Amino acid sequence: MISGIDMSVPMIAGLLDSIIEEMGAKDRREHERRMKELQIIENSNLKDEYVKQLLLDRILYPVEKAQHDIQNTAKHAQWLSEIVLFHYKDHGLTQEQAYELSKQLKLLAIQITHADSLHDLKFVYAVITMFNNKVSVFKHSKREYSIHYNIRDHILNKLNSCIATGNNFKVREELMKLMTGQSLPILEPQK
C-alpha cells in the first residue's frame, strides 16, 4: 500500500465525469422543455405577445435593476445610521453628534426611497454629495471604515450608476421614437 493515498480514491475517480454528465442531462432536459414551449407559442396566437414581453423584459431589466440598487442604497444608509451609534468614538464623534448623524442618515434613506424620477434622483445625489462633504470631517483610523468613504462607495457610486442607467434608457427611448416614429406603449405620456 502506498502511504498518503486514501482508500476513498476509487470513490473520487470519475466523480467529475459523473457531475458533468448529470449537469449535461439537466441542461438537455431544460432545453427540450424550452423548445416545447417555443413550439407551442409558435403554433398559437401568443407568438407576437411573447416576443413583445421578451423585448420589454430586455429593455426594462436595467431600469428594474437600477430601482433595486436605489433601494439597496437606502438600506445601506439605514445600516450606516445604526453603525454610527455603536462606533461613534472610532469616528471622533460625541454621543450627541452620533445620535444626530444617525437621524440624518435615516432621513437620507427616506429621501433616497422618495426619488421617483431621474430628476429627483439627480437632486438626491447632489444633496448626498454635499452631505458627504460635511461629514468627511469625522475620520476613522482606517479609511475603509470612515463614514464619508462608506457613503461614497456604497451610496453615491451606486446612485451614479442608476442615474447613468436612467439617462441611457431615455436616450434609447428617444432613439426608438426616431427610428419607429412612435414610443413604447407603456412609456407614452398619460393623458
Image (cartoon, grey):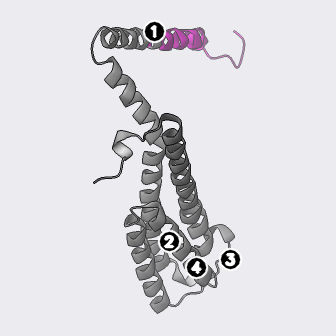
Residue 160 coordinates in the image, percent (x, y): 58, 60
Q: Which residue is mark 4?
A: 130
Q: Which residue is mark 3?
A: 141
Between the residue at mark 3 and the residue at mark 2, the CA separation in whole angstroms equals 31 Å
| Residue 5 drawn in magenta | yes
Can residue 146 be seen in this snapshot?
Answer: no
Foreground of the two, 143 or 40:
40
**Is residue 181 placed above or below 141 in the rendered structure?**
above
**Is residue 16 placed above or below 57 in the rendered structure?**
above
Foreground of the two, 98 or 29:
29
Between the residue at mark 1 and the residue at mark 2, the CA separation in whole angstroms equals 50 Å
**Is residue 90 placed above or below 5 in the rendered structure?**
below
Q: Quadrant of residue 30?
A: top left
Left or right, 38 with reference to 157 = left
Q: Report the quarter where the C terminus lies.
A: bottom left
Q: CB of mark 3 within 8 Å of CB of mark 4?
A: no
Residue sitting at x 54%, y 58%: 163
Q: Which residue is mark 2?
A: 123
Q: Which residue is mark 1?
A: 28
Which label lies toward us, 4 or 1? 4
Q: Earlier in the sequence, mark 3 or mark 4?
A: 4
Q: Quadrant of residue 185?
A: top left
Q: Earlier in the sequence, mark 3 or mark 2?
A: 2
Residue sitting at x 68%, y 77%: 141
For numbered disc 1, what is the local secondary structure?
helix
Which label lies toward us, 3 or 2? 2
Stretch of the chain drawn in magenta: 1-26
Q: CB of mark 3 within 8 Å of CB of mark 2?
A: no
Q: Residues within 10 Å of mark 4 (few under 14, many from 20)?
A: few
